[in-house]
Image (cartoon, rainbow, N blue to C red):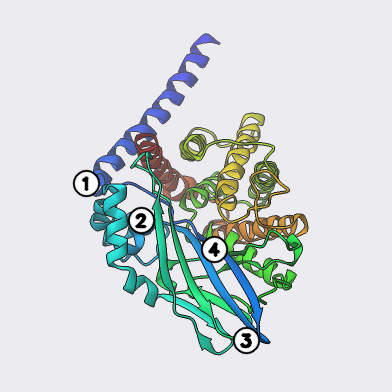
Amino acid sequence: MLLIQFRTFTANCKAFLSLLSFGLFGLLILASGQTVAHEIRPAVADLSITSTTAQDQTLGRLAIVIDFNVEMFLADLDASVLSNTDDAQQGNDYDAYRRLSVADLSLQFRKQWPRFAASLVGRAGKETLAFQLGGIEVENNVDLSLPRSSKVSIYASLPHNNNPIEFGWDAKLGPLVLRQQDVAANLDELYTAFLAPGSISAPIPRQGQAAQSKQAIITDYIKNGFIHIIPKGLDHILFVLGLFFYSARWQPLLGQVTLFTLAHSLTLFLASTGYIVVSPTVIEPMIAASIIYIAYENIRRQRMNAIRILVIFVFGLLHGLGFASVLSDIMIDDSIPNAGGFASGQFILSLISFNIGVELGQLAVLAPAFLLFGVIANNALWYRKLVALPASYLIGATGTWMLFTRVING
């Protein structure tokens, strides 16, 4: 009996060491191209409209504070197509700007203000608005392995009419969360929207009496949830593929994915509403570790057991916290901790829509994989040796690389 247990232990150790060796090999291949990995997050713009009436004419001023990654703009990265800054050809320029002092970065932005102003779109009715630079505030005393946040203040005089305001920017600057600010207004009546790259806001009345429609909220957040799987969610894609390559049959796959979905939906809700607060610097390496473990499980086990079920549920909780860290950047509701500019009804609707988008993204990953391997292979004997095991080794190697970079850069 002891001999059998020893052999089992030895076999498990060999499988794990093989995966680790494969992962280290992957590190050697990828090390030459190492840069600091930063996921590109949406910019957030707070818009304020002040109006006065004089001699039957309505005068006004539009002021906007944009919180975004100035270094990306200066390096001319295209945030509409990149999932993180490592994918950019201008990665060296971006890193050079990141190393600038607060004063030097502010100076560089002021020099390139005309180019930034040309990327802005502002209208009052049919009249184009001319924006001026009010100032720039660069985050100080931060870990330079992480992207800095800079707040750029801009303003424009409004024409002598009461035409509503529209605002947006060039697609290269990426997605934009636009939030109307007015302390005197009802939060439900203020305009808040997630704008896809290059999109323009709906007309915003100067008195702030029009909120984004529920249909637009649902569409925007389903789309946002989807793109955080495809193309931006490589770690989540690897995890669900790891679940798939455990078995090409639909019953085990359905059970695993359902459990994973329930778990990440739970922590997505709890973290987005502020009941759980965990730093992304802790969560992201743990998500990478979950990819490695799932790949390791695929290699050493061939039958579903209670341990794997528990592991999937726990890792689902981790991935939900990862989704929440993304969602917290674009959902702000003062009535809900860590949620900021949305009213509570919009917040719940947005949260559900985002989760639907995540599930659609997962389905878009799993459906082609199942059609390609599940239907054709039908779990044949050659499938594990020729497909599942090599794929699991590759997934594990990629997870090892992710863990390495996230720990080093975290």
Disc 3 designates what residue? 161
Q: Earlier in the sequence, mark 1 or mark 3?
A: 1
Which numbered mark, 1 or 3, is in the foreground of this view?
A: 3
Are the residues tagged 4 and 2 within 8 Å (C-beta)? no
> Which label sits in the foreground, 3 or 2?
3
Q: Earlier in the sequence, mark 2 or mark 1?
A: 1
Residue neighbourhood size for the residue with mark 1, other residues' Cα within 10 Å, grouped as few (<14), some (14–19), many (≥20)? few
Q: Furthest residue to the top?
A: 2
The amino acid marked with disc number 4 is: Pro
The answer to whether residue 10 is above or below residue 358 is above
Q: CA distance from mark 4 to mark 1?
A: 32 Å
Quadrant location, the C terminus: top left
Residue type, numbered disc 1 = Ser
CA distance for labels 3 and 2: 43 Å
Q: CA distance from mark 2 to mark 1?
A: 16 Å
Tell me what residue is drawn at x 36 percent, y 32 percent. Answer: 20
**Residue under circle 4?**
368
Q: Position of residue 262 (x, y in %)?
A: 70, 45
Task: Pick whichever, 23 or 320, lies toward us.
Answer: 320
